[in-house]
Image: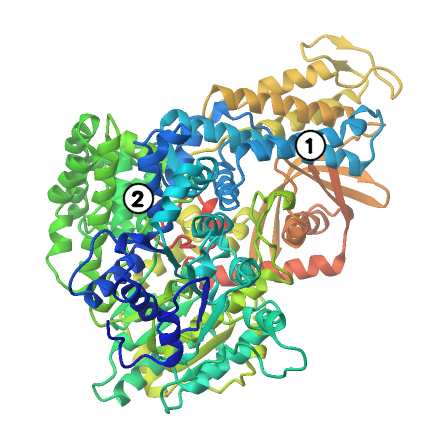
Amino acid sequence: MTLMPSLNPAQKQAITHKSGPLLIVAGAGTGKTTVITQRIAWLIAERKVQPDHILALTFTDKAAGEMEERVDKLLPMGYVDLWVSTFHAFCERILRDHALDIGLNPDFKLLDETDQAILMRENLERFDLNYYRPLGNPTRFVASLVKHFSRCKDEAIRPEEYLQYAEKLKLDLDEVHGRKRKTEAEADQIVEAERVNEVANAYHTYQQLLFEKGALDFGDLITQTLYLFQNRPKILNKFRQQFEYILVDEFQDTNWAQYELVKLLAKPNNNLTVVGDDDQSIYKFRGASVANILAFKKDFPETTEVVLTENYRSCQNILDLAYTFIQNNNPNRLEVQLNGQNQAPNSKKPVINKKLVAQTKASGEIEYWLMPAMEQEVLAVIEKILAVRKAGKGKVSYNDFAILVRANDYAAPFIQKLKNLKIPFQFLASAGLYRQPIILDILNYLKLLDNYHETPSLYRILTLPLLKISLPDIMTLMSIARRETKSLYEILRNVRVLSGLKPETVIAIERLLSWLDRHTQLARIHPVGEVTLRFLEDSGLLKEVIKKTDAEHLEQVNYVNQLFQIFHNFQIRHAEPTVGNFLRELAFAQEAGDSGSLRPPEWEQGPEAVKIMTVHGAKGLEFAYVFIVNLVDKRFPTIERREPIELPDELVKERLPEGDWHLQEERRLLYVGITRAKRGIFFTAAEDYGGTRKKKPSRFILELDLKSRVHKLKSSFLKKLETGPLQKENNLALLKKALPPYFSFTQLKAFEKCPKQYKYAHLLKIPVQGRATFSFGQTIHTTLLNFFKLVRERSNANQQDLFGNPIGKKTENSEPLVTWAELQQLYQAAWIDSWYEDVRQKNDYKKRGIEYLKRFYENLPKPWPRPLDLEKGFTISIGNQKIKGKIDRIDPTAGGIEIIDYKTSERPPEEEKDAELKQLHIYAIAAREALKLNPVKLTYIYLATEKPFSYKVDKKAIEKTKAEISETISEILQSDFAATPSKFTCAACDFREICEDRWRG
């Protein structure tokens, strides 16, 4: 075989390496795929290795397909049975043939993360959970537990190992358990041991469930194959003899279990080639271990190292910028560690040098812009794209530009502005199908078929453009529903007798009702896919989507096709694939964090468009010009978020990284972003992203040693950009009229979380389904209100018991003013029976309420407090606006009064203390200004722990709260109520199912 003449010496050395371990350090843009495929072809053509005796492993189906396609072209005579695949596909192939050898079903079903969460939720009673089954949300930790089990499998930790570790923790604490008095630290150790034992048993139960169902998850594919090889030596030897040469691509992305599998297979000849770059290891969140590539030389001391440094992508100044920047990860880099291991004494020359050398003489553009606000940052990026494209005189297309964001959600402003300006773009996300507008429309219609009284869903359908119902008419309908305390659907059923609606609105509503009647009958027995297709046809929505062939409509067709593929898969595996059953499974999936996977389009073959994607998504791609945006503190690098359930260090088998591994990973991620650029790299940031404080530039800007260039937008360009359709202006004016005459803490909090949530809840007043936490909270508040009313009444001379019988005046040293039995009776009388998921949850809450009240009753200070006021309503003025509210309890105290508020929730973390205090500050302002009292103490009583948290009244802090409230109200009055999504806000939002702006992750 003749090697390609364009290969450089390092590439040729790597391709023609004869035997033994080989480490190919392949920097960005150095042609690693060429080297791997040429090496496979060379082994077959020159070393006469049988094709099925070569195993090539990579991480994506796309990479495996590309590798096989290239080998095809290099071997025109053809070959048979080349093993080029992902790790998971390779292991599945092994297990299908050898599952019986370790007691598994060879026809096993393969479960993804969503399937795992659904399996666990459907069998929740099998899991003896306490710590990880909170009363208010029993399934809250299901997704976290599934992720934890996956991490266990990354480390090849079997349930037996976890159980042994948990048992050891318990045994170590036997002596402590025996003591009557325990220190706080000892009590914490006991709780931790119980928590670990709960997780270990849950892992064991989960694996048992998989076995019973004849199923494996993706982690099992690796761990069960590893177990097979470790415990069936005959089978291991068979595959060792078969695979004479093993090649692993993207080696820096392997986890511990995958590396163990490869090492086991490669012995004893160790003809193992690994290709990777530690500086591009960016998948720690998936379990990838950069420690593997750092340790390869230690594991295989006889390794030959080949470093590919000739870069065929970028200009030298861009490469130099990236290389200087990544040095900040020293000494935890392969270059430093290998040089330390291999360097001869007194030698100054490094053994390997990873500094990339450009194969072009051109110099690239490098710029950093710090803009006053996010809007200017977006405009500056678009202006630059248009200017470069114009200067290119037809040689530069929109395909040459990429806007890279740290997280999908940060793409929204760029998407919106490009859309408004009709500049073609593609947002390349791997997830988020269920958030696409057309998919939200379809899913909310299906929810209506399952339950007509889903008002948020009905609201979304009423706003469909094809119905042409005006917002004023929708608001009129909502107002009537509230006034008559009926569901929106009930109001629509009597639309003919309503006044004030346009005739065309009445006709549109009757059309909608006819669809609902027709499709509800279908939905009871027909598959969900068939019902959906009938809706799309009858409504004309399908015709509307397919009548245009522009990029936006083609994208919508693609989304609908993907949804129907989900329907198809559901219908295959479900005995009764009805709308109701699909929606229940979808709810489980979304609860587990599944936002609907998106098939990535073949962007190279797609329409000419600016590409918007995450930096992670850009790995392996290249563009002429790259914009890395939002380079500000806490966005890039992000705040480290630890796993909800962490693996105990004692069970972790990988070599734990040294230093700040999160910061190192973020640095590698930016390095990947920089090295995507061929001719220009632009870093952008803004001081204002909508919060109360200015944003600081990212620390990475300092490490890159970039000086901000003043980027002034041209006035003509700015005018052009800002001149667009003034859409929604009339609707916005209408919404402003719906602003309430009074504000409340709840309203202000909703707006601060997300203006769009505020719009839905407090302007449109879309009704939402109640929650168990609301019913329970109201029950407890009512119970304590009636309890203290009774305490106050009985402090007088003439008293009666709950049944009206006279009782004598009680003193502090006699019987309590209200007995425990009476408090329980008050609790039963106040109990709200609505919104609990099932009888078990309701009974759990009832029991929890008794525990809260018992602890509260027993810990009441002596003498019992005699409240001055209970549930005291107030109205105060802050600036020109009115604030209304209600104080749970006001007690007399030395020097003034104490304001008390009850909480049935857990206490928020310390960093949320300021937000926590804002409510009490409003009450303090009300006490002083409206009630003419002197507040000196502010207290939250968290009934879950019965620990009061008290604060002295701080006049400066209260003035600060006043200023913040004025600012928030001012923002409400000027707002367009655009969404400000975040992971945690959207997860708890009642309107997330109808909002297309929800968190993209």
Is any atom of residue 380 visible in this view?
no
Q: Crowdedness of circle 1 by 10 Å Cα count: few (<14), some, many (20+)?
A: few
Q: Please say if 704 is above or below 269.
A: below
Horizontal placement of 576 versus 793: left or right?
Answer: left
Res 662 quadrant in image: bottom right
- Horizontal and vertical percent position of residue 548: 12, 61
Residue 430 seen in the current view: yes
Of residues 720 and 680, the one nearer the viewer is: 680
Q: In x, y percent, where is residue 844?
A: 56, 22
Disc nearer the start of the sequence (2/1): 1
Instruction: Determine which residue is flagged by label 2.
Output: 459
Q: Is residue 279 above or below residue 115?
A: below
Q: Residues within 10 Å of mark 2 (few under 14, many from 20)?
A: many
**x, y percent for residue 398:** 26, 76
> Which residue is disc 1 drawn over?
168
- Under mark 2, the amino acid is Tyr
Can you say whether 470 is above or below 822 in the image? below
Quadrant where the C terminus sits is bottom left
Q: CA distance from mark 2 to mark 1?
A: 56 Å
The x, y position of residue 85, in whole percent, is 31, 53
Query: What residue type is disc 1 on?
Result: Lys
Quarter residue 786 falls in: top right
State the quadrant of the N terminus: bottom left
In the visual, does 493 lie left or right of 455? Answer: left
Q: Nearer the viewer, mark 2 or mark 1?
A: 1
Answer with left or right where residue 819 lies relative to residue 92: right
Residue 705 tag number: none
Front-most of residues 966 and 563: 563
Give the colour scheme of this rendering: rainbow
Left or right: 702 in relation to 891: left
Q: Badges 2 and 1: C-beta atoms under 8 Å apart?
A: no
